[in-house]
Amino acid sequence: MKSQTALNNDIVNNACLSLKAKGLVWFLLTRPQGWKTSLIKLSETLPESKNSLRTALKELEDEGFVRWSKDKVTGATVMDVYETSRPNPNLAQDRESRRPQHKA
């Protein structure tokens, strides 16, 4: 495993992501290529509950940092993690409507 990782600022500058979601995506992006995990394995590795991790993963999915698909051979659910946001056009809720409103 690498001892240092450079990551794009899209993650830290995304106002729609909680610190928990930002930390989780950074953790996931530092795993080796081909690394496999599950919600149960993450909850055993990290000091977060499954529900807490599920919430953070949903945030990441909503903001386009995580996408889920089915492996065509095994049928297993696969999580793809991205360093830059790749908005999902299939999301019903508009991304802009979720952005926090800052008071001037």
Image (tube, grey):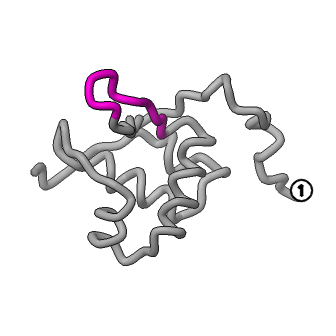
| Crowd class of label 1 (few under 14; some 14 to 19; many from 20; radius 10 Å) | few
Q: How many marks?
A: 1
Q: Residue at x 60, y 40 (%)?
A: 63
Q: Is residue 28 left or right of residue 32?
A: right
Residue extent of the magenta highlight: 66-75
Q: Is residue 7 above or below residue 25?
A: above
Label 1 secondary element: loop
Residue 8, position in %: x, y?
A: 41, 39
Q: Which residue is mark 1?
A: 104
At 48% from the left edge and 35% from the top edge, which residue is drawn?
A: 67
Q: Is residue 35 left or right of residue 25?
A: left
Residue type highlighted by circle 1: Ala
Please state the horizontal and vertical placement of residue 33, each as a whole percent of the image. 18, 37
Task: Name which residue lies at 13% across and 55% down.
Answer: 3
Q: If the image is split into quadrants, where does the C terminus sit?
A: bottom right
Query: Which residue corresponds to the image point at 38% horizontal and 38% vertical from the top-left?
Result: 77
How far from the left and from the top, in percent, is residue 5? Answer: 24, 47
Magenta stretch containing residue 69, yes or no? Answer: yes
